[in-house]
């Protein structure tokens, strides 16, 4: 059973990207945000669950993040299979950083969540 399987009933915002989350949930981001999200964060009860790829020294690690106005918490982190990691690193040109998931990683995550 996958580490993610326990989150199968959690609402995942598959379109949320790291920059969107920061803009929506940080104090300065709630006004004048020009992103694709029309619904602004209105209260401490608002929450988003989404995936990010942390690509640092150890290569790509995918984390399920819960973000509220209070901050962000990694609910689960796992390493994609080696072939997916390799292709992701090529896609980002070997650059380090925090990235949104791509289509291939989303497909892998959906299998991990729902199978």
Image (cartoon, grey):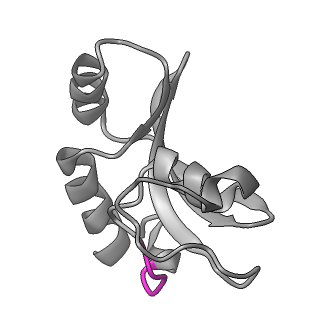
- Quarter holding residue 79: top left
- Image quarter of residue 85: top left
Residue depicted at x 61% and y 60%? 31
- In the depicted structure, whether residue 14 falls above or below residue 39: above
Magenta segment: 8-12
Q: Position of residue 34 (x, y in %)?
A: 42, 53
Left or right: 56 in relation to 102? right
List the single residue furthest toward the front: 32
Q: Where is residue 93 shown, x and y percent of the image?
A: 29, 13
Closer to us: 21 or 11: 21
Image point (22%, 23%), residue name? 91
Position of the N terminus, as image quadrant, is bottom left
Q: Residue 9 lies in magenta, yes or no?
A: yes
On the image, the x and y values in percent for residue 17 come to 42, 51
Question: Quick check: is 92 in the magenta stretch?
Answer: no
Quarter of the image with the C terminus in it: bottom left
Magenta span: helix, strand or loop, mainly? loop
Furthest residue toward right: 70
Residue 80 vs residue 36, the one in the foreground: 36
- Residue at image point 33% right, 62% down: 15
């Amino acid at each position: 059973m996958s580490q993610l399987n326990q989150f199968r009933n959690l609402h995942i915002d598959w379109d949320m990207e790291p920059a969107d989350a920061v803009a929506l949930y940080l104090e300065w981001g709630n006004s004048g945000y020009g992103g694709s999200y029309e619904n602004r964060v209105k209260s401490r009860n608002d929450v988003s669950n989404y995936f990010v790829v942390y690509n640092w020294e150890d290569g790509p690690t995918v984390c399920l993040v819960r973000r509220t106005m209070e901050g962000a918490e990694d609910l689960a982190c796992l390493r994609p299979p080696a072939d997916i990691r390799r292709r992701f690193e090529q896609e980002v040109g070997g650059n380090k950083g925090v990235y949104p998931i791509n289509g291939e990683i989303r497909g892998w995550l959906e299998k991990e969540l729902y199978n």
